[in-house]
């Protein structure tokens, strides 16, 4: 008597993503025009955008705008940089920093690597 074959893994549709695009920022630090909604939110309600970023990363809402959050995100996706550069960016351009992280999260969600 033949044993029926049981399929345990279903084929899935996936988008091929190059390894190079996984290890870089999806947008530049000053690319606010690529997602105006994120830019407006960061400009007019910076703490709200920080909380969104922290929520996306499953972290405390108060950490969304910190150097630690930027460093955590960068190291999670093997994006080149250093804690020193993260510190300088969050010190001199905090809105741009949080907007860049949020745009990156949104883009990575779209291509399925977040």
Image: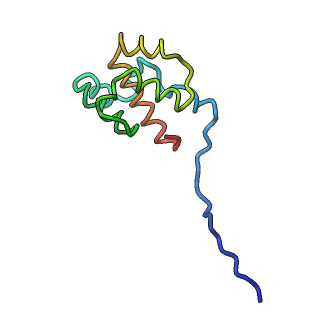
The picture places residue 30, in percent across and down from the top left corner, at 41, 17
Q: Is residue 84 left or right of residue 64?
A: right
Q: Nearer the viewer, residue 49 or 110?
A: 49
Figure quadrant of residue 59? top left
The picture places residue 65, in percent across and down from the top left corner, at 33, 24
As drawn, the residue found furthest toward the right would be 1
Figure quadrant of residue 81? top right
As drawn, the residue found furthest toward the left would be 44
- Vertical placement of residue 29 versus 7, above or below: above
| Quadrant of image for the N terminus | bottom right
As drawn, the residue found furthest toward the bottom would be 1
For image coordinates 45% across by 17% down, the residue present is 86
Q: Is residue 8 left or right of residue 100?
A: right
For image coordinates 53% across by 41% down, the residue present is 113
For image coordinates 47% across by 20% down, the residue present is 28
Figure quadrant of residue 78? top right
The picture places residue 102, in percent across and down from the top left corner, at 39, 31
- Vertical placement of residue 84 versus 56, above or below: above
The picture places residue 51, in percent across and down from the top left corner, at 29, 33
């Amino acid at each position: 008597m033949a044993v029926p074959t049981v399929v345990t893994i279903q084929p899935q549709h996936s988008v091929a993503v190059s390894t190079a695009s996984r290890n870089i920022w999806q947008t530049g630090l000053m690319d606010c025009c690529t997602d105006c909604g994120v830019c407006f939110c960061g400009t007019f309600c910076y703490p709200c955008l920080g909380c969104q970023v922290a929520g996306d990363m499953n972290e405390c809402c108060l950490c969304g705008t910190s150097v630690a959050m930027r460093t955590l995100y960068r190291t999670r996706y093997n994006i080149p940089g250093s804690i020193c550069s993260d510190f300088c960016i969050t010190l001199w351009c905090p809105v741009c920093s949080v907007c860049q992280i949020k745009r990156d999260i949104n883009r990575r969600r779209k291509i399925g690597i977040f």
